[in-house]
Image (tube, rainbow, N blue to C red):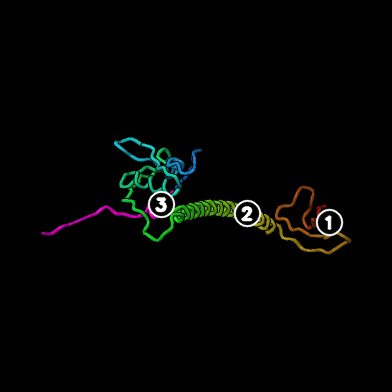
Amino acid sequence: MQIDLKEVPQMTIEEFADANQLVMEVRERGLPVGDRMRYYACFKSAEVMESGCLVGAHGDGATPEEAIEDYAAEISTKRIAVDAWKPARREILVPRLVKKPDGLRPSETVSSIEESRARAEAAEAGKVLVEKERDALRTLFKRLEDQLAESRAEAERLRGQLAAARDYPAQVGGFDGDELTLTLVLPVLPPGIAIGEHVTLRVSAALGEGG
């Protein structure tokens, strides 16, 4: 006889939390030391899905470790919804949650969850940093595009001035004090100027003005 056996996956609640980036929240009630209801624990923003409804679930215990173990037994092999009322909603099928192997101290449960939380916070901080760097690059590229457009416009303006100057050949006269004398050869003479006369343009080198 051939048997195709598929068992439910199993892991510790710490491994499950790490694999799904879940944060375990442990809170203390104002109860005496040793009271089995002193602490309660549950995953942040997680609810159990039962019969089409979302049900809040938590574990109780006299210590944080006991509360976490009780919560693990409560959600084991069930389906949970994380951030159920947000766009980032996730539904996760919980495997069979088992206790840590012998030889590990109960305090390691809380410490490993704290490490998982630190890793999740670091990952979120990294995402924020990447977005800021992208925004800075977009701003830089926009400035470069604007500067390039201005440079092109200035080049076109200078090209137009050069083309206009070529239509009016000039002979350099000389310097007279702070003025430079240019003799323009005009293709069409302005009124009042006879043939053979020179049109002299005096440019002030000091003031940058024409005369």
Residue kind at label 1, given as amino acid type: Ser
Q: Mark 3 points at which residue?
A: 17
Alpha carbon distance from label 3 to label 1: 81 Å
Q: Mark 2 points at which residue?
A: 147
Q: Which of marks 2 and 1 is nearer the N terminus?
A: 2
Secondary structure at badge 2 equals helix
The crowding category of the residue bearing disc 3, from other C-alpha atoms within 10 Å (few below 14, some 14 to 19, many at least 20), is some
Residue 68 placement (x, y as % from top left): 41, 47
Residue 179 placement (x, y as % from top left): 85, 59
In the rendered image, the quadrant that contains the N terminus is: bottom left
Q: Name the residue under label 1.
A: 204
Residue in front for this viewpoint, 84 or 116: 116
Outermost left residue: 1
The magenta region covers: 1-23
Residue 152 placement (x, y as % from top left): 61, 55
Which of the 4 image quarters holds residue 52?
A: top left
